[in-house]
Each structure stands twice: as structure tokens, then as C-alpha cells.
Amino acid sequence: MARSAVLNVMVQAAMKAGRSLARDFGEVQNLQVSLKGPGDYVSQADRKAEQIIFTELKKARPDYSFLMEESGAVEGSDAQHRWIIDPLDGTTNFLHGIPMFAVSIALERQGQIVAGVIYNPAMDELYTAERGGGVFLNDRRLRVAARSKMVDAVIGTGIPHIGRGHHGHYLVELRNIMADSAGIRRMGAAALDLAYVAAGRLDGFWEDDLQPWDMAAGILMIREAGGFVSDKNGGQDMFATKGIVAGNEAIHKALMATLKKPI
Ligand code: IPD
Ligand code: CA
Ligand code: CA
Ligand code: CA
């Protein structure tokens, strides 16, 4: 597996931020935590990791633009290239001592996602992808799962918390997926959920209300693993609509159909 220079830069940044997160995870009770809204936490660990990634990427590619969860957008002189960064996906897990969290970094070139890295430091799992070059977990090339029937499929999702809307509408979707599938998982880190679809661990995934930094790297990984990704209307406007549906071709199709059913 030969990584391009830019992918190496992304891997170095993600691993450095991951080491910082791993240290903070060991002392989670001492971290300063604040609320951005009901149920929506941010800690020193998120901010520190974001600063590390920003510094590393800025040093390597001074002109590129940024979109980051905690600091927002930073325009560079090169508007054709944009980093999309979630410094800590799974903050709630992290703050509860649950080791399901990750750094996610994607690179967009002229609006297309061309490279992605997702790193879970607690499990030392590094997912990397480049457009046209495949997706890897550490050194192993990944393919989406082959299971083609919903009755055999394990489907990941995210469930809205206090302060998020859509609770009633989500119940309908959950009820229908429950009735059709082999099981539902809610692991608490959307970037990892998408990486797990690329790895064939989850057969499919859907969620509403995600942000570009939750999805960008994972979208590329699923495509590079031979999977299908769309918004909830079947289009490619995941960032604008904030909804996503993913799986292999058959499971993606079946999920779309199940999600449209009335209760
Ligand atoms: C959250 C996680 C979670 C998803 C939420 C996201 P954060 O990201 O990905 O699984 O359900 O919608 O906001 O805030 O922990 O980076
Ligand atoms: Ca957050
Ligand atoms: Ca996130
Ligand atoms: Ca985050």
C-alpha cells in the first residue's frame, strides 16, 4: 500500500491528535467540559486535538482552506482545497470512558472528497482512503460486506439526543429497521460507523442531522470499499441535507425502501 505525500501528512496529523486524545482519555475526570447545547458536549480534549491537526496541516499545506467542528471555517488563499476535520468524533463516549471515538480528516479538491483518514487511538485502528486507490484498515484492504438481505444485515445508526429534533420521526424509522433487519447498533461515533461499513463490520448505516466533518472521510471510504452512499432522497447532497444512507448496493437499496415505509 503506497500512500501519497498528502495522505501521509493526514496520517501524521491524525495520529498526533490521536495520541493527545489517548492521554486525555486516561484522565478524563480532570478535563474541562462545556455544553454547546442540551446534550452537546465539548472538552479541552476536542479543542487540543483540533489545534494539533490544524497546526500540522497548515505547516504542510499553508494555502489550503479548513472546515473544523470546533473552530469553524478558515479560508486559505487556495479555495480549491479544503480540509474537513472532526478532531474527536464520539465526544459523549469519550467523556463516559467508552473507547469508541476517533479523529476524522478529509481532503476535498474542487468539491470532491479525494482523501480521508479516520483513527481510533483506543483500538489503534487507522483507516485510510484515496480516491481511486482503495481503502485500508492499517495494512489490510477493505471491502463492504457481501450480505445482500436485510434479514441478515446488522445496521448502524445514530439516535438524536435531548436538544435535537426528529425524535418521533426517528422512532418510525427505528421501528421499521428493527422489524426488517438482524439487528441495530448505535455506537456513538458516526465517522467510525461509516468506517465500519467500509470494513464490512456493519452491513449498512443511516443517520439524520450529521455534519460534513462527521461524514466526509467515511463517505470516501465506503465508495472505495465498493459500497453505495446517498442522502435520504437517493441523491448525493449529504452535506446539504445532513442525512446519509450507506451499504453495499443491495443493502443500500433495501434500506432506502425500509426508511420510506410508514409505521
Ligand atoms: C456525534 C457522533 C454521534 C452522532 C452525532 C454527532 P461528535 O459527533 O458522531 O454518533 O450521532 O450526530 O454529532 O459531536 O461526538 O463529534
Ligand atoms: Ca460535537
Ligand atoms: Ca462528529
Ligand atoms: Ca467532534
Image: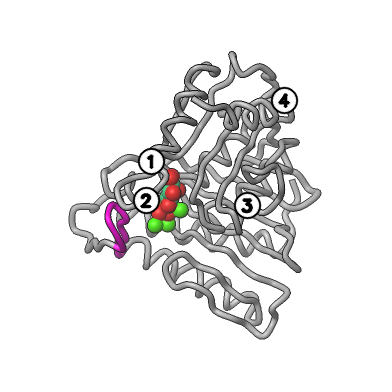
Residue type pointed to by label 1: His
* Residue range corresponding to the magenta coloring: 36-44
Mark 4 C-beta closer than 8 Å to ligand 1: no
Q: Are marks 2 and 1 in contact (CB under 8 Å)?
A: yes
Give the mark nearest the N terminus, 2 or 3.
2
Residue 203 place in picture, x, y as percent = 60, 27
The residue at 57%/73% (across/down) is 66
Q: Which residue is mark 2?
A: 164
Residue type pointed to by label 2: Arg
Q: Are marks 4 and 2 in contact (CB under 8 Å)?
A: no
In which quarter of the view is residue 12 placed?
A: bottom right
Of tags 1 and 4, the one toward the viewer is: 1
Left or right, 244 with respect to 166, comes to right
Most extreme residue toward the left is: 30
Q: Which residue is mark 3?
A: 238
Q: Tell me the crowding category of disc 3: few under 14, some 14 to 19, or many 20 or more residues within 10 angstroms, Cα based.
A: many
* Image position of 182 with respect to 107: above or below: above
Q: CA distance from mark 2 to mark 1?
A: 8 Å
What label does residue 167 carry, if any?
A: 1
Question: Does the image show residue 121?
Answer: no
Left or right, 89 with respect to 111, comes to left
Q: Between residues 205 and 63, which one lies in front from this camera angle?
A: 205
